[in-house]
């Protein structure tokens, strides 16, 4: 399989199992975000709620696309990190997986709604930073800081949005809803009125679906990191794509870049043009002897992947430059053809998506009680009401949905919903309605997640590199 010796094949399978374990842990760690409100308002029985949530998490993974997954993949400039020693790729993958799982299990054990997103991203950054410290690093920066900053901003802004929007929605409900039943504490054994129950089930469904669409993609991105890091020649390019179209796109981009008047361009723009033409020339040379994608040798496929990603970076810079004179038609031609080229690099096999969806779905049905108790009982000083539960989940679903399908950025379902629950408590009776000890513990977990996961992953990576 993949032409790997038995020991490397074993390590590949071990890494894939660990990725499934991470997504499984993510499932039972984060499922409380969706089911806490329906359970604590008696809208659904616990076992019905977790099975229902698992189903919609599974569907969400398939519906979410791969935009967020590729954001995870490109946090590390993996083309620069991979060298001739395949064990170094295994050390990288093993370190970030182990650190992410350890922190997720630890926070789950203590019932803290910590973020799986922060954990995974922190682990990836920790590996990249540790790699940059190695004396044999000749590729420069080992973290894509532009992507990291964009991802970091989404993780910071999204909980603030969840808190603020929930407060606003609670005030609107109080102002315009005359039926005060939704603002009362649920009966301990009786389900809510049918219309309230339907709303709560709907919000649970939306959070489950959008959680799968966002968090599931993180698992997909993680598996693609494993495959590209350990068997890059097999997964460098999407083999199901048209083998001829890639050559046509390369030639069209070459023609447009050749039209650019370089007379008055800055040295920076000239460097981008030279780089773009160099990458194009290298790909044209590779395809000249092979004819199409399928005929390329495996090692050449990975080189083409690297050329495409560099060409994408160069073309984006050129199109942003005010000194580059191109017609609108030529600009659109570059954009569409580079996008077509990126479709060969930005993909995930169906079996990867199914594997992650299944892991997340099964994990959702297990181990949910610890976090549910924290969200339902401990964030505020009062029992969760129907209005609070519906408001927090509706806002969480909206923020996660926009982040996934519009901005294609990873966010933390845990942070958004916990912030929403806190916002609903504040809207009811002010800040004094929050439980200070729980809020302090959650905030501490939030603050520590990124640095601790970075430290763990970096330490494990250096240790594994030394061992391997």
Image: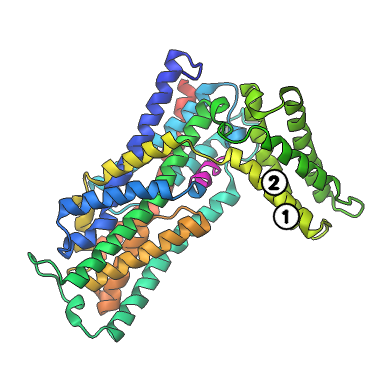
> Image point 45% across, 26% down: which residue?
464
Q: On the image, which quarter does residue 34 sit in?
A: bottom left
Give 381 or 295, whichever is nearer the viewer: 295
Percent from the top left, x then y, of residue 53? 27, 52
**Image point (90%, 55%), residue name:** 264
Is the residue 349 above or below the residue 187 in the image?
A: above
Q: Which residues are magenta?
A: 69-77
Q: Residue 101: name its quadrant.
A: top left
Residue 250: x %, y % from top left: 73, 39
Q: Nearer the viewer, residue 339 or 319?
A: 339
Residue 300: in sight, yes or no?
A: yes
Q: Residues within 10 Å of mark 1 (few under 14, many from 20)?
A: few
Horizontal relation, residue 144 to residue 465: left or right: right
Residue 324 sits in quarter: bottom right
Give the x, y percent position of residue 246: 68, 37
Residue 332: numbered disc: 1
- The number of numbered discs placed on residues in the rendered structure image is 2
Residue 259 versus residue 369: which sits nearer the camera? 259
Q: Which mark is residue 337?
A: 2
Mark 2 crowdedness (10 Å alpha carbons): few <14, some 14-19, many ≥20: many
Q: Secondary structure at mark 2?
A: helix
Image coords of residue 253 (percent x, y): 76, 44
Q: Is residue 443 visible?
A: no
């Amino acid at each position: 399989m993949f032409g790997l010796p038995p020991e490397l094949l074993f390590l590949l399978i071990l890494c894939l199992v660990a990725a499934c374990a991470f997504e499984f842990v993510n499932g039972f760690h984060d499922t409380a975000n969706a089911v806490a409100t329906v359970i604590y308002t008696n809208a659904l029985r616990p076992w019905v709620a977790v099975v229902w949530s698992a189903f919609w998490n599974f569907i969400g993974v398939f519906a979410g696309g791969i935009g967020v997954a590729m954001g995870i993949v490109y946090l590390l400039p993996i083309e620069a990190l991979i060298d001739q020693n395949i064990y170094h790729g295994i050390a990288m993958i093993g370190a970030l997986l182990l650190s992410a799982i350890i922190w997720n299990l630890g926070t789950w054990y203590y019932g803290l709604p910590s973020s799986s997103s922060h954990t995974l991203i922190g682990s990836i950054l920790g590996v990249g930073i540790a790699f940059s410290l190695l004396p044999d690093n000749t590729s420069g920066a080992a973290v894509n800081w532009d992507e990291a900053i964009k991802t970091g901003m989404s993780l910071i802004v999204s909980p603030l949005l969840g808190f603020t929007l929930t407060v606003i929605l609670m005030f609107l409900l109080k102002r315009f809803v005359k039926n005060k039943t939704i603002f009362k504490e649920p009966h301990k054994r009786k389900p809510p009125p049918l219309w309230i129950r339907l709303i709560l089930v709907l919000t649970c469904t939306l959070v489950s679906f959008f959680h799968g669409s966002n968090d599931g993609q993180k698992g997909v991105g993680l598996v693609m990191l494993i495959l590209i890091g350990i068997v890059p020649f097999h997964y460098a390019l999407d083999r199901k794509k048209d083998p001829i179209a890639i050559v046509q796109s390369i030639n069209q981009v070459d023609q447009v870049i050749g039209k650019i008047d370089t007379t008055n361009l800055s040295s920076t723009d000239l460097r981008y043009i030279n780089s773009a033409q160099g990458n194009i020339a290298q790909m044209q040379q590779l395809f000249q002897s092979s004819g199409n994608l399928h005929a390329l040798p495996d090692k050449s496929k990975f080189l083409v992947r690297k050329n495409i990603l560099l060409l994408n970076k160069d073309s984006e810079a050129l199109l942003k430059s005010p000194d580059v004179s191109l017609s609108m038609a030529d600009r659109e031609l570059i954009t569409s053809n580079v996008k077509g080229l990126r479709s060969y690099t930005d993909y995930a096999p169906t079996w990867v998506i199914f594997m992650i969806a299944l892991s997340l779905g099964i994990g959702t049905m297990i181990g949910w009680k610890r976090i549910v108790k924290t969200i339902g009982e401990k964030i505020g000083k009062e029992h969760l009401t129907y209005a609070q539960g519906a408001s927090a989940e509706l806002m969480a679903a909206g923020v996660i949905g926009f982040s996934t399908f519009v901005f294609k950025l990873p966010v933390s379902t845990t942070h958004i919903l916990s912030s929403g629950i806190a916002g609903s408590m504040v809207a009811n009776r002010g800040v004094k309605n929050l439980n200070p000890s729980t809020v302090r513990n959650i905030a501490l977990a939030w603050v520590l997640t990124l640095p601790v996961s970075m430290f763990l992953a970096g330490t494990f990576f250096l240790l594994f590199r030394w061992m391997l």
